[in-house]
Amino acid sequence: MPIATIQIVEGRDAQKKRGLIAAVAQAIATSLDAPNDNVRVIVQEVSADLWGVGNQTVAERRARQPSQ
């Protein structure tokens, strides 16, 4: 039974996460020629202040970006 664990910064809506799970499960099932029902996908959300990029947190980087 293949298991994929994906870590993302929190903040995406349920529909986006559902799409991610479906796409990853399908990719694994296809590449391994395994039944889709045997694939497990775990999405772990991490707070933006606990995810670092370089010497900054994602929260700090977002705060410095100009508003769009």
Image (tube, rainbow, N blue to C red):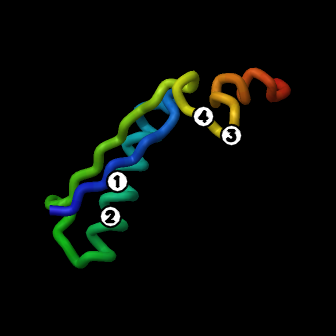
Q: Are marks 1 and 2 in contact (CB under 8 Å)?
A: yes
| Residue underneath mark 1 | 22
Q: Secondary structure at mark 3?
A: loop
Amino acid type assigned to the residue bearing label 3 in the image: Gly
Q: Are marks 4 and 1 in contact (CB under 8 Å)?
A: no
Nearer mark to the viewer, of 4 and 2: 4
Amino acid type assigned to the residue bearing label 4 in the image: Gly
Q: Secondary structure at mark 2?
A: helix
| Residue underneath mark 2 | 26
Query: Residue 43: x, y in percent?
Result: 35, 41
Structural distance between the alpha carbons of marks 3 and 1: 31 Å
Structural distance between the alpha carbons of marks 4 and 1: 27 Å
Q: Are marks 3 and 4 in contact (CB under 8 Å)?
A: yes
What quarter of the picture does the C terminus occupy? Answer: top right
Structural distance between the alpha carbons of marks 3 and 2: 32 Å
Q: Is residue 15 left or right of residue 35?
A: right
| Residue underneath mark 3 | 54
Structural distance between the alpha carbons of marks 3 and 4: 6 Å
| Residue underneath mark 4 | 52
Structural distance between the alpha carbons of marks 1 and 2: 6 Å
Question: From the viewer's perspective, is residue 47 above or below residue 30?
Answer: above
Q: Residues within 10 Å of mark 2 (few under 14, many from 20)?
A: some
Amino acid type assigned to the residue bearing label 1 in the image: Ala
The image quadrant of residue 23 is bottom left
The image quadrant of residue 57 is top right
Q: Is residue 18 left or right of residue 57?
A: left
Q: Residues within 10 Å of mark 1 (few under 14, many from 20)?
A: few
Residue shown at the point (27%, 69%) measured from the top left: 29
Q: Nearer the viewer, residue 63 or 67?
A: 63
Nearer mark to the viewer, of 4 and 1: 4
The tag earlier along the polypeptide, 4 or 2, is 2
The tag earlier along the polypeptide, 3 or 2, is 2
